[in-house]
Amino acid sequence: MQMIAQLFRKKWRFALIFTMLAMLGACSSTPEKRPQTEVRHSVGDVASRVALRQLGVPYRYGGSTTTGFDCSGLVQFSYAQAGLRMPRTTSQLWSATETVSKRELQPGDLLFFNVDGKMAHVGMYVGGQRFVHAPSSGKTVAVASLTSDYYDKAFVRAGRPR
């Protein structure tokens, strides 16, 4: 009987030591590595941020560089910087986009406006009912509100590049 009691105490001590070592091991282990979430931006989002960096650049008819932009040149330049080739003129841009409703607008969507009775102006949506564009001679690249009286009345259509 005494031998059984000694054996039981040895097993109990072994179990206690084993449990303590396991607990210490668990405390010192490195935490499970979680995959880092990668933030991916759409091409339109990148293009709209590029366009916003051009604020203050002068309007220049036919311009598509940082020395001067017209409306379609700003769009073409911004999308090129984001990695997407876009056509050069407003009417070609119209053809290169799929119609989206105002409710579905996302940064980078193109906004087409009627000026003097014809579709002749394009801007790029940046969010919050605002868009960036190269307005006209004597002005600079600027942000305007889609809800302003002028642009609300002149708005023809929004399009997302294909």
Image (cartoon, grey):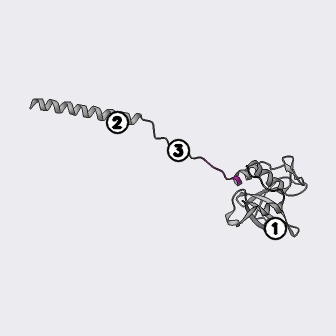
* Disc 3/disc 2 C-alpha distance (Å): 26 Å
* Disc 1/disc 2 C-alpha distance (Å): 71 Å
Element carrying mark 1: helix
Mark yes or no: residue 28 visible: yes
**Is 145 part of what is drawn in magenta?**
no
Q: Position of residue 161 (x, y in %)?
A: 73, 59
* Disc 3/disc 1 C-alpha distance (Å): 47 Å
The one nearer the camera, 144 or 10, is 10
Query: Depth-wise, is mark 3 or mark 2 nearer the camera?
Result: 3
Q: Residue at x 53, y 44 (%)?
A: 35
Q: Earlier in the sequence, mark 3 or mark 1?
A: 3
Asked whether, in this view, residue 29 is left or right of residue 80, the answer is: left
Query: Depth-wise, is mark 3 or mark 1 nearer the camera?
Result: 3
Which residue is labeled 1 in the image? 154
Mark yes or no: residue 51 visible: no
Q: Residue at x 31, y 33 (%)?
A: 20
| Residue range (magenta) | 38-43
Asked whether, in this view, residue 27 is left or right of residue 152, the answer is: left
Q: Amino acid at mark 3?
A: Pro
Q: Residue at x 8, y 32 (%)?
A: 1
Q: Is residue 30 above or below residue 65?
A: above
Q: Position of residue 27 (x, y in %)?
A: 39, 35
The C terminus lies in quadrant:
bottom right
The crowd level at tag 1 (other Cα within 10 Å; few <14, some 14-19, many 20+) is some
Q: Amino acid at mark 1?
A: Ala
Element carrying mark 2: helix
Which residue is labeled 2 in the image? 23
Element carrying mark 3: loop
Asked whether, in this view, residue 135 is left or right of residue 23, the answer is: right
Which residue is labeled 3 in the image? 35
Q: Amino acid at mark 2?
A: Met
Q: Earlier in the sequence, mark 1 or mark 2?
A: 2
